[in-house]
Amino acid sequence: MRCAICSGRNEEFARARLGIGVEAVYLQCSGCGFVQVRNPEWLASTYADNAIAATDAGLVSRALYIRDVASAVIGGLFNGNGPFLDYGAGNGLLVRLMRDAGWDFYWFDRYSRNLFSAGLEADLSGETTYELATAVEVAEHFVDPLAEFRQILSVARNLLFTTQLLPQPTPRPGDWWYYGLDHGQHVAFYSTESLRAIARSMGCHFVSNGRDIHLLSRRKVPAWLFAILCHPATARLLKLTFRRKSLLDEDYRRLTGNGAG
Ligand SMILES: [Zn+2]
Ligand SMILES: [Zn+2]
């Protein structure tokens, strides 16, 4: 099995027993450093049980932080009128938060139910072009990263996404929490080089905060500027600078036929 990103040579470097009782085989590409789990046939069934791992205690604080970062990045770099797409949006919490902040976000998720942004499902037919997509803690679930990134970038001009970069040297499964051995849903782990390879094959520019937040964009964004926009303190501040009229009232009226009071 060749590397799913650069077709380089894969080598098995570790095996680990997952909490769901199966063994995962970890392959690493000698070209771009990408680590993937070989044939994770159990994935679909773990989603059917629970699309959001019950152990994901960081869900809400992450959503609040990403709201601030996405607001700063959109306000600082892109057309604030949108529309925007949250890909792999889960229960719709980030969509709701972004709309409360005035950004015209829509929901898409293949596995999860839309609880917080009902009626705001995205259109992935290709008829709508989104100014920017977000994909928060989604890419590490991709079995075929190139196909997934291509699908997102076929409907969105830019993609802001989060996933933890692989530490150097590559940690063993027991030595890095992000492998998620308890739930077995993380199957793709990216080096900076592997994200660059994705950008090249999409014809996009790539910039990252060097840790967990990354951007694929049509025009080049300086790394220093992206770092400032992603920093928690500046992101919080800039969110106020780029403040827009909330869509909450409008959404409520559409759902109920009433004003929000
Ligand atoms: Zn590779
Ligand atoms: Zn995850």
Image (cartoon, grey):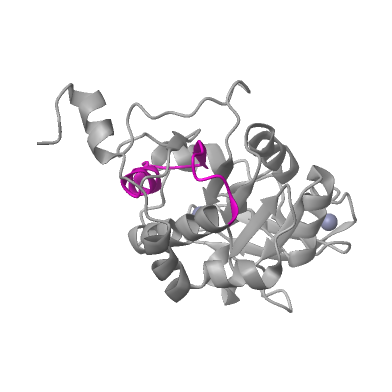
What residue sits 47% from the left and 40% below the top? 47
Q: Quadrant of the C terminus?
A: top left
Q: Residue furthest left?
A: 261
User: Quadrant of residue 255 in the image?
Assistant: top left
Q: Is residue 133 above or below residue 173?
A: above
Residue 129: within the magenta?
A: no
**26 or 126, which lies in front?**
126
**181 or 251, which lies in front?**
251
* Residue 98, position as x, y percentages in the image: 39, 48
What residue sits 89% from the left and 62% below the top? 31
Residue 80: within the magenta?
A: yes
What residue sits 67% from the left and 44% below the top? 143
Q: Which region is colored magenta?
A: 77-101
* Residue 87, position as x, y percentages in the image: 53, 40
Q: Is residue 147 above or below residue 55?
A: above
Left or right of residue 145, residue 101 in this image: left
- Residue 141 in view, yes or no: yes
Left or right of residue 215, residue 6 in this image: right
Left or right of residue 114, residue 214 in this image: right
